[in-house]
Image (cartoon, rainbow, N blue to C red):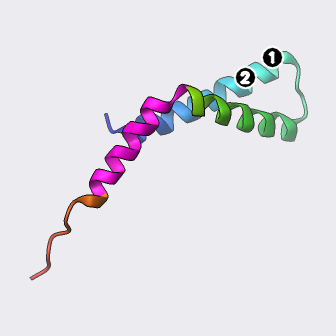
Amino acid sequence: MHPVVVYTASRIGLFIITLGLLALVGLRNPLFLLAASFLISGVASYVLLSKQRDAMSARISDRLDQPKPQDD
């Protein structure tokens, strides 16, 4: 599977899990709930998704390093 898709799906999943856990804990203010979920899932993804992030950046770097075909 494409590394960008895996990383993006993992980030979204981590955000949804964090959102659900914080809602279960009792946060009811929607703005605070979203902001806290965004921050916590961002920190968690930095730690937990390092392999996926490295694979994604390698894939993007490889694509950028490929020569572009010349138009005739």
Image side of residue 8 versus residue 45, left or right? left
Rendered location of residue 15, percent (x, y):
65, 32
Determine the residue located farthest toward the bottom in the rendered image: 72
Residue at x 67% of width, y 33% of height: 43
Name the residue tied to disc 1. 24
Could you tell me how far apart the alpha carbons at marks 1 and 2 are, in whole angstroms? 6 Å
> Magenta segment, principal secondary structure?
helix
61 in magenta:
yes
Classify residue 19 as left or right of residue 12: right
Provide residue 4's location: percent of width, then percent of height: 41, 42
Q: Position of residue 37 (x, y in %)?
A: 74, 33
- The residue at 64%/28% (across/down) is 44
Q: Residue at x 39, y 42 (%)?
A: 56
Q: Is residue 14 left or right of residue 70?
A: right
42 lies left or right of 29: left
Kind of residue at badge 1: Leu
Question: Residue 9 location, x and y as percent?
Answer: 49, 34
Residue in view at x 28 percent, y 51 percent = 62
Report the amino acid beneath label 2.
Gly
Q: Are marks 1 and 2 in contact (CB under 8 Å)?
A: yes
Q: Quadrant of the N terminus?
A: top left
Q: Badge 2 is on which residue? A: 20
Q: Element under label 2?
A: helix
**Disc 1 packing (10 Å; few <14; some 14–19; many ≥20):** few
Magenta residues span 48-63
